[in-house]
Image (cartoon, grey):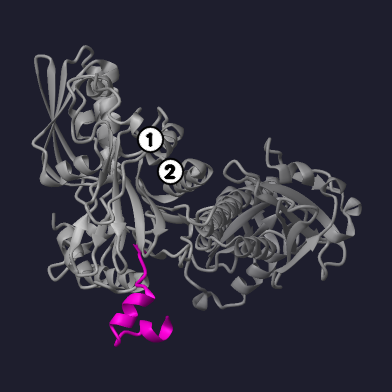
């Protein structure tokens, strides 16, 4: 994490049966994010009917917003190809950015992220709630609470 | 081979010499038979006594015979005659001359490329083009740029002079070939122009009689860069085909440089306009709530315009004002354009600011597209004065949660969380309601602050912990001072290192008159 000038993104491939594994190393930032999307496009074209794409993030040193954007693109591509996406070995920093942006579930849901997410529901980032930090004078609940936790039935 | 004696009389001429000099027969005077340059060379050669004569191989002369050129090598003989060996060197000489011209032209092209490409200033490019063309290609040159409204920008230069800039309201159609050359497409060949048909504005001062005119288009990168007009004075030789080709080579370089300069100028002006539009607003007190904001754009030129903030004052007194602070993914102009789109969309959605989730959902839908997953993260804060307190509704959309600084120095994180905007088909949000007592402060910031890298070792992240500690030192400070303190600390942290955009907005419930009266030492007592 100490390298100020960004280290180039490294991609190492290995495949077995119906899974392809890509080890990521270096920075997934605005300089290199496109590389990942291009590589995944290539992989999906080379392996039609791929069941699982595993991205091993252990070696990632930094991920910025462009890097996250690339991961979201990857998820769209794997969804379209009917392949599952797995983000293995997530670093603390990656987990943090995925948690703050509420994209962890979408990216790691079993398949077709959005639908699956809606079915499971009830997680930290799902639904819609309002909270009050308890400081007097306490505010009442929002009048538009009818929208809350929409798909819980 | 030709042999002549000391009296410059031809002694012998072989068959080949007879073909070159038909009048050279034994007994005829050299002066009648061969060109003057050979006669005088012979005189020089026979002026010496035989013993002093230069050795064979020296004294070679060269000169034209008819439309060809010959080298003549003298071999003095002991009987006082000189044998002239004539060698036709026309082709050799032509090749040498061509090589020399080519070298000179290459050097000129390299020099002009260097001069032209060292500048991204369009005016300077036009000046250089006109001056170099006038000095090397013609007696005078005009560079005409595509029309800017009704005027044609023209730079003219006479050989040896300095370029002069003018704008003329003239019709390019009046000069045959000029309008086509200015349009740039389809590429037109250079046009010869009848000098007597040239309008007066085409002839620069200092050039009296026109001999010939050539108009060459300046090809740009898909955009017309203008036209180059080369003029030669009456009496000077007209343009040869080679010179015209060469003029086109020069025009290609000049055109490329000028269109690059024009594109750069256009881009710079677009960026400038966008940036001016994107500059954060000055904040102040609105409806009894204090606002302060600070923005330190990244110096990295690739990273323009990622962060933004806005305060939209409530339409009616007592209604909440909406504060937006956000960060657009990606860098550069594209990010700046997306920032503009978000700010405009949110402005249009202001009537539903009482429902953050709906506002963000609509924004999300308007930003979604299939080509890319560009997204933005942001915090919406609705703030309304409620007695002495300020009621806040805070909603994060994929953004670091705002920090609440209490007047006693405690720092809490607002419990709001939500999906980033613009990438997923649906978003979820969690809104926090917070009440700011007088002296309490809510701090919205972008990750350029918390993830600023620097510190004593250079590579450490400023981090949320350090930010919390920094804030707790700001307890009970006015909003403006909190912003300045945070900016100062992060600036010190990054030092001279690279950093992302850093934006911070502070919302405060002002200390009331009541409080300053209790604490008789504060400034508030006098300013309230």
Q: Establish if B219 lies above or below B44.
A: above
* Location of mark 1 (residue): A144
Q: Please indicate, yes or no, whether residue B24 appears anywhere in the rendered image.
A: no
The residue furthest right is B196
Left or right: residue B250 versus residue B141 is: left
Q: Which residue corresponds to the image point at 43% horizontal and 35% vertical from the top-left?
A: B367
Q: Establish if B446 lies above or below B207.
A: above
Which residue is nearer to you in this view: B409 or B137?
B409
Please tell me whether mark 1 sits on a helix, a strand or a loop: loop
Which chain is disc 1 placed on?
Answer: A
Left or right: residue B229 versus residue B56 is: right
Q: Is residue B491 magenta?
A: no
Q: Which picture quadrant has residue A111?
A: top left
Which residue is nearer to you in this view: B527 or B77?
B527
- The residue range painted magenta reads B507-528
Please tell me whether mark 2 sits on a helix, a strand or a loop: loop
Q: Which picture quadrant has residue B26?
A: bottom right
Q: Please indicate, yes or no, whether residue B210 appears anywhere in the rendered image.
A: yes
Counting from the top left corner in percent of width and height, residue B425 is at 35, 27
């Amino acid at each position: 994490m100490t390298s100020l000038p960004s280290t180039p993104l490294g991609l190492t491939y290995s495949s077995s049966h119906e899974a392809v594994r890509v080890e990521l190393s270096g920075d997934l930032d605005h300089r290199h994010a496109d590389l990942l999307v291009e590589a995944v496009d290539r992989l999906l074209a080379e392996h039609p009917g791929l069941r699982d794409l595993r991205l091993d993030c252990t070696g990632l040193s930094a991920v910025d917003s462009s890097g996250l954007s690339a991961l979201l693109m990857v998820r769209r591509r794997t969804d379209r190809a009917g392949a599952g996406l797995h983000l293995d070995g997530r670093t603390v920093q990656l987990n943090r950015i995925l948690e703050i942006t509420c994209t962890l579930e979408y990216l790691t849901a079993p398949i077709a992220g959005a639908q699956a997410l809606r079915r499971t529901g009830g997680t930290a980032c799902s639904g819609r709630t309002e909270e009050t930090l308890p400081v007097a004078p306490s505010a009442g609940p929002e009048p538009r609470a009818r929208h809350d936790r929409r798909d819980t039935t | 081979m030709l042999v002549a004696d000391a009296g410059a009389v031809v002694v012998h001429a072989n068959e080949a010499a007879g073909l070159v000099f038909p009048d050279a027969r034994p007994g005829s005077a050299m002066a009648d038979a061969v060109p003057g340059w050979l006669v005088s060379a012979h005189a020089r050669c026979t002026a010496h006594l035989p013993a002093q004569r230069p050795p064979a191989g020296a004294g070679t002369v060269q000169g034209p015979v008819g439309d060809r050129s010959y080298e003549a090598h003298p071999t003095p003989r002991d009987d006082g005659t000189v044998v002239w060996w004539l060698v036709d060197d026309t082709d050799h000489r032509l090749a040498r001359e061509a090589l020399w011209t080519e070298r000179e032209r290459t050097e000129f092209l390299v020099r002009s490329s260097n001069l032209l490409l060292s500048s991204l200033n369009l005016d300077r490019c036009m000046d250089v083009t006109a001056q170099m063309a006038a000095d090397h290609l013609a007696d005078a040159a005009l560079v005409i740029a595509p029309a800017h409204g009704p005027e044609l920008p023209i730079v003219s230069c006479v050989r040896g002079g300095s370029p002069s800039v003018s704008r003329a309201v003239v019709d390019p159609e009046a000069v045959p070939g000029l309008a086509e050359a200015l349009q740039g497409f389809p590429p037109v060949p250079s046009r010869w122009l009848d000098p007597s048909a040239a309008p007066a504005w085409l002839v620069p001062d200092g050039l009296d009689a026109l001999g010939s005119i050539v108009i060459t288009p300046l090809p740009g990168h898909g955009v017309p860069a203008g036209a180059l007009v080369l003029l030669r004075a009456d009496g000077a030789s007209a343009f040869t085909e080679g010179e015209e080709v060469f003029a086109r080579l020069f025009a290609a370089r000049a055109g490329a440089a000028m269109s690059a300069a024009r594109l750069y100028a256009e881009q710079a002006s677009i960026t400038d306009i966008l940036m001016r539009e994107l500059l954060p607003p000055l904040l102040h007190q609105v409806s009894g709530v204090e606002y302060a904001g600070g923005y330190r754009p990244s110096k990295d030129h690739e990273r323009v315009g990622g962060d933004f903030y806005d305060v939209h004052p409530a339409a009616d007194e007592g209604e909440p004002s909406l504060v937006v602070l956000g960060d657009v993914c990606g860098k550069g102009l594209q990010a700046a354009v997306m920032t503009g789109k978000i700010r405009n969309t949110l402005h249009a959605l202001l009537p539903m600011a009482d429902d953050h989730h709906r506002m963000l959902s609509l924004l999300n839908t308007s930003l979604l597209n299939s080509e890319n997953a560009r997204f933005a993260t942001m915090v919406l804060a609705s703030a309304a004065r409620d007695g002495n307190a300020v009621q806040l509704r805070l909603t994060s959309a994929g953004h670091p949660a705002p920090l609440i600084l209490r007047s006693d120095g405690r720092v809490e994180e607002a419990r709001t969380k939500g999906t980033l905007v613009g990438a997923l088909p649906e978003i979820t949000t969690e809104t926090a309601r917070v009440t700011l007592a007088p002296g309490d402060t809510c701090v919205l910031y972008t990750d350029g602050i918390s993830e600023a890298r620097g510190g004593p070792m250079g590579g450490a992240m400023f981090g949320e912990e350090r930010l919390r500690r920094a804030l707790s030192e700001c307890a009970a400070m006015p909003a403006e001072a909190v912003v300045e303190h945070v900016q100062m600390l992060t600036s010190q942290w990054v030092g001279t290192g690279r950093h992302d955009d850093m934006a911070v907005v502070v919302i405060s419930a002002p200390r009331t008159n009541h409080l300053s009266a209790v604490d008789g030492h504060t400034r508030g007592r006098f300013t309230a």
